[in-house]
Image (cartoon, helix red, strand yellow):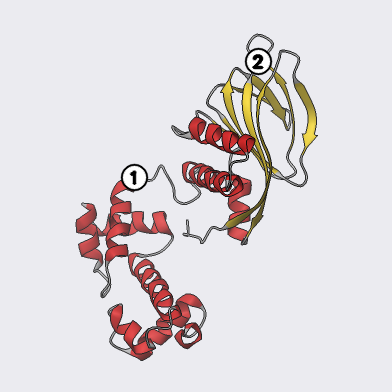
Amino acid sequence: MLFEDYDFTITDIINIVNIRTDAMWSLKNLKTPNHWILSFVVDGQCLYSWKEQEFLLDKGDLIFFQKGFSRSAKSSPDNPWQFIVVKFKLVCNNRATEHALNEIPNIIRNGFVHSQQSFIQMEKQWRGRYPGYILKCKSILYDIIYSIMLKSGIFYDTDLPHKDKLIRVLNIISENKSANIPVNELAYESELSPSYFRLLFKNFTGYSPLQYQNYIRMKRAQDLLSTGSFTVTEVANMIGINDVYYFSRLFKSTTGMPPSKCI
């Protein structure tokens, strides 16, 4: 799986409401063509149905409905549900993000440890209309959706063996400001054999260790160049490349533009 620059913009929050239902509450074939839905089950139970399947929701579950999703629901007559619902609009800034958000499961069981508090805080801010409440609600919503994407395996395979060791290696690469680290050294840091490390690293990032390091270094070079404070030669030396011509070729093959375009 390739690391992608996932990015979306929450353009509008329509409402955030805490709803306590009764035994008669229901909705039928509800479709929201212009906005997305994110809900948290505060208490009770609810039976949702879509695509000829039924799903019983319990306290702590999260519901994520993409724009245009059609569903029906009815509250449990014995244990009516209470939920906090957020209706919002967002724009995907690239195809990778659009695909990723459409692949997120509609039900996330047991949510997250911080889910209830986050939803309660959002609803309180929205209901009270405190100064800056829209910014605060959007920041919480961004964090919740990020957590959903992380838990859903969008960023990387959460079931991959030795995931923690691989993340440690990524941190080492991120902190490295000089030449690329040899694969054998990275394998040693991960406590894995070089061949097994290469295989897992490729599965984890979509890149070989060398490709990934070049990607990180070129993106750092792009950041440095865009400040306007350094020449191409200076930036090449700062990331451990003494041959400016090799640096320029590597930069263009990674970013799609020559380094001079960033200055």
Point out residue 147 in the picture as x, y percentages from the top left corner: 48, 43
Q: Is residue 26 left or right of residue 142?
A: right
Q: Disc 2 marks which residue? A: 80
Q: Secondary structure at mark 2?
A: loop
Q: Nearer the viewer, mark 2 or mark 1?
A: 2
Identify the image quadrant of residue 67: top right
Q: CA distance from mark 2 to mark 1?
A: 41 Å
Q: Is residue 38 left or right of residue 179?
A: right
Name the side, left or right, on which 36 lies relative to 217. Answer: right
The furthest residue to the right: 29
- Circle 1: element type: loop
Q: Which mark is residue 161?
A: 1
Can the viewer see residue 72? Answer: yes
Q: Is residue 73 above or below residue 260?
A: above
The image quarter containing residue 141 is top right
Badge 2 amino acid: Pro
Residue 189: x %, y % from top left: 21, 56
* Most distant residue in the front direction: 131
Whether 262 is drawn above or below 67: the answer is below
- Which circle's residue, 2 or 1, is located before the other in the chain? 2
Q: Which mark is residue 217?
A: none
Residue 8 % position (x, y): 59, 56
Q: x and y percent of residue 123 in the render?
A: 59, 34
Tell whether label 1 touches label 2 (CB within 8 Å): no
